[in-house]
Image: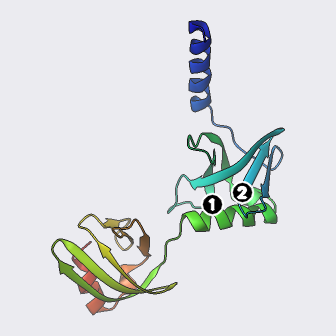
Amino acid sequence: MTDQNIVKKEEQLVGDLLETRFLTPRGAIFSQTEGGFLSLAVDGTDYGRVKVIRAFPFTDPARYLSVRQADNEEREIGMIEDLDVFDPDTIGWITRQLEMRYFVPKILKVREIKEEYGYSYWWVETDKGTCRFTCDQNGVTKLSDTRLLISDIDGNRFELADTGGLSAKELRMVDLYM
């Protein structure tokens, strides 16, 4: 490859990074593969399997969705500004993919939290059932005055949507981590 070709390739990559392509039902055709994965064709180009990533997973989960190639480079193909403009089948396929990627059980009740050797051991009731998990000292992120995101040592995430709904006993346990 000549120096001139290398420069052109670099210019194209920079241009691709600076330009956001918005995907709409007019040019983007989503489908589901036999294996249940999401695939995409845009303006005649078939990208095969793709992945969808939320730009704002907690504040605006159905808007500004980045659609990327599913290979190791994960290059962005385009952005969905608003999922609701697509047909019901497409919305369903994309929503299922997002639910798998962003599985975040909601904590409904805190049974017990124990602290030992710099780790906290949680026993909670979630919307998906009873769960026990372990957090390190950086495991709790305060999203607002009453909303917490809790990440365990295995990378699983749990949401405590409203600390105001906890009993006084539960709040005392959780308050140490807020």
Q: Residue at x 58, y 61 (%)?
A: 61
Task: Report the disc number at residue 38.
Answer: 2
Query: Which mark is nearer the camera, 1 or 2?
Result: 2
- Where residue 38 appears, as percent x and y from the top left, is 72, 57
Q: Residues within 10 Å of mark 2 (few under 14, many from 20)?
A: many
Amino acid identity at mark 2: Leu
- Residue wearing tag 1: 62
Amino acid identity at mark 1: Ala
Task: Report the disc number at residue 150.
Answer: none
- Where residue 90 appears, as percent x and y from the top left, is 77, 60
The answer to whether residue 176 is left or right of residue 90 is left
Q: Nearer the viewer, residue 48 or 64?
A: 48
Residue situated furthest left in the rendering: 117
Which quarter of the figure has residue 8?
top right
Marks 1 and 2, Cα distance to the nearest angstrom? 17 Å
Q: Residue at x 23, y 67 (%)?
A: 137
